[in-house]
Image (cartoon, rainbow, N blue to C red):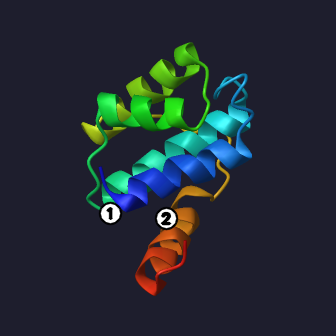
Amino acid sequence: MSELVKRSIKALSSIVNIATGITHPLDEARAKELFKALRADGEQLTYDAIEELALANKWPERHAKFLAELAERIGNGGRVAIKHPRDWGEPTVARLKAEIASGKA
């Protein structure tokens, strides 16, 4: 998996209440926006990779599975409705790409 996907899941994990996963509508919107932005950037979003990253970032197993299912659906071109847009996905991916390019940890 790419460094961008790794950092993206870490960023999502830092803003979402991982104990409840993406059950809150604003957290769900952030996750959807993030995955859509990653897919638009050409990143592969596989169930196994996202589940592994979520678990590594201390997500409870059931929430990690749900996040992985969502990522895979979006990664395969599935449509999702974002009911509460946060304008978070694209700016976050752009920021993380800049950090990677500059060598920031």
Up-down relation of residue 98 to residue 93 (above or below) = below
Above or below, 15 relative to 64:
below
Q: Which residue is mark 2?
A: 93
Per the model, the C-alpha gap separating discs 2 and 1 is 9 Å
Q: Where is residue 42 drawn, in percent x and y?
A: 26, 59
Would you identify the image quadrant in which residue 47 lies?
A: top left
Residue ID at (69%, 48%): 14
Residue 104 position (above or below residue 63): below
Taking depth in this image into account, of 4 and 32 the one nearest to the observer is 4
Pointers 2 and 1 in contact (C-beta within 8 Å):
yes
- Name the image quarter holding the C terminus: bottom right
Name the residue nearer the viewer: 3 or 24: 3
Q: Earlier in the sequence, mark 2 or mark 1?
A: 1
Identity, as a three-letter code, of the amino acid under mark 2: Val
Q: Residues within 10 Å of mark 2 (few under 14, many from 20)?
A: many
Residue under label 1 = 41
Residue 79 shows in the view: no
Image vertical order of residue 3 relative to residue 66, above or below: below
Closer to the camera in the image, 44 or 99:
99
Secondary structure at numbered mark 2 = helix
Residue 50 placement: quadrant: top left
Residue at the location (55% across, 41% down)? 31
Task: Name the residue type under label 1.
Answer: Asp
Secondary structure type for disc 1: loop
Asked whether residue 25 is in view, the answer is: yes
What residue is rendered at 62% in x and 58% in y?
A: 88
Furthest-bottom residue in view?
Answer: 102
